[in-house]
Image (cartoon, helix red, strand yellow):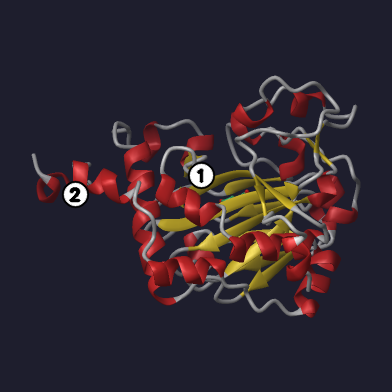
């Protein structure tokens, strides 16, 4: 069967070559260009634990990466024939395409770019930034809600307050398509994030008493807009009640001097080893070729970018 008959992309050599090809010069230039980030937005992030930014990616670069990321997600899930209802409850929230960058050099260029990393650095108010991971999160039509949780509880990374995620809308994501919602200010609750086991949920997890009464703010986005959210802010997402895919790309960052560690209150985080933490002992600097340092061009280059 060909592409028209199946409705799914066929991964010919040509398609795979695109996922390995460097971006054309104007796209590269865009990725290197700093986002004009207003200091008031950084203050808002510090205050609420999240912030919305318009047009982090626009025009041709947005079209270019929407298509490429779509191909990478399609490739990752090419052998998964299951209907939504056949999946585990957690999987019904989204197609989770974790760490695309080590597999597809074209995506690596995007994930490691200066434009996003510099904005992350300013949000976290740190000197240097390391990549933690990327993941595309495509919520299928009819996809269920994403249960409330706090990211830092899943991550063996300290300090948790110096971790952040950019959540980029590759298409318009209004409330009915499953946009994110944040418990504004909840990042100040505790430096020890509480582990909410969304992976084994059987039904919607009731929001805990500790964060139920925070103002939960919805963050609908236009394509190309993004949010940054702290590793310590509680958040969730709505279900996708449309017949179109909710296409989002996320990149998680940590401060360049982060260590492989977790609070005593959450031993679960220590069990969550990945490529980037292989061989590390608790308390080690989180050094790995799977956690490349971004914003490091030598000669204090990152200082030139300080806003
Ligand atoms: O995209 C979603 O539905 C949830 C994303 C999320 O929880 C995150 O990026 O931390």
Residue at the far front: name it.
299
Is residue 181 depicted above or below 155 in this figure? Answer: below
In percent of width and height, residue 256 lies at 77, 47
Closer to the observer: label 1 or label 2?
A: 2
Disc 2 under 8 Å from ligand 1? The reply is no
Residue at 66%, 33% in the rendered image:
288
**Is any atom of residue 227 visible in this view?**
yes
Between the residue at mark 1 and the residue at mark 2, the CA separation in whole angstroms equals 22 Å
Give the position of the C terminus as an image quadrant.
bottom right
| 208 to the left or right of 30 | right
Residue at 62%, 74% in the rendered image:
35
In percent of width and height, residue 171 lies at 43, 66
**Is any atom of residue 240 visible in this view?**
no
Residue at 47%, 75% in the rendered image:
58
Is residue 1 depicted above or below 36 in this figure? Answer: above
Q: Check disc 2 and report the residue beneath it.
A: 7
Query: On the image, which quarter does residue 200 sit in?
Result: top right
The answer to whether the residue labelled 1 contacts the one labelled 2, judged by CB atoms less than 8 Å apart, is no
| Residue 114 vs residue 168, the one in the foreground | 114
Category of crowding for the residue at label 2, using alpha-carbon neighbours closer than 10 angstroms: few (below 14), some (14–19), many (at least 20): few
Disc 1 under 8 Å from ligand 1? The reply is yes
Give the structural element (helix, strand or loop) at label 2.
loop
In percent of width and height, residue 73 lies at 38, 45
First reached walking from the N terminus: tag 1 or tag 2: 2
Give the structural element (helix, strand or loop) at label 1.
loop
| Residue 219 vs residue 1, the one in the foreground | 1
* Residue 179 disc label: none
Category of crowding for the residue at label 1, using alpha-carbon neighbours closer than 10 angstroms: few (below 14), some (14–19), many (at least 20): many
Give the position of the N terminus as an image quadrant.
top left
Q: Check disc 1 and report the residue beneath it.
A: 93
């Amino acid at each position: 069967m060909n592409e028209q008959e199946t409705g799914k992309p066929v991964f010919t050599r040509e398609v795979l070559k695109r996922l390995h090809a460097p971006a054309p010069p104007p796209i590269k230039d865009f990725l290197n260009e700093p986002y004009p980030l207003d200091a008031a937005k950084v203050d808002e992030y510090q205050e609420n634990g999240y912030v919305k930014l318009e047009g982090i990616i626009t025009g041709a670069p947005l079209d270019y990466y929407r298509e490429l990321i779509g191909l990478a997600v399609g490739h990752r899930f090419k052998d998964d024939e299951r209907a939504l209802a056949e999946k585990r409850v957690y999987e019904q929230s989204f197609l989770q395409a974790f760490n695309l960058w080590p597999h597809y050099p074209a995506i690596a260029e995007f994930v490691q770019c200066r434009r996003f990393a510099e904005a992350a650095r300013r949000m976290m108010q740190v000197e240097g930034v390391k990549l933690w991971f990327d993941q595309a999160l495509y919520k299928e039509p009819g996809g269920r809600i994403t249960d409330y949780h706090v990211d830092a509880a899943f991550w063996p990374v300290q300090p948790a307050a110096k971790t952040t995620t950019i959540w980029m809308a590759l298409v318009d994501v209004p409330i009915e398509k499953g946009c994110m919602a944040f418990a504004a200010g909840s990042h100040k609750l505790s430096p020890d994030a509480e582990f909410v086991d969304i992976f084994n949920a059987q039904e919607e997890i009731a929001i805990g008493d500790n964060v139920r009464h925070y103002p939960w703010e919805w963050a609908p986005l236009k394509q190309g807009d993004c949010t940054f959210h702290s590793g310590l802010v509680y958040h969730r997402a709505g279900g996708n009640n449309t017949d179109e895919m909710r296409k989002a790309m996320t990149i998680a960052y940590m401060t360049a001097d982060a260590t492989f560690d977790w609070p005593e209150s959450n031993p679960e985080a220590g069990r969550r080893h990945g490529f980037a933490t292989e061989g590390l002992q608790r308390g080690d600097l989180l050094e790995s070729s799977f956690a490349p340092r971004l914003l490091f061009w030598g000669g204090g280059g990152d200082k030139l970018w300080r806003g």
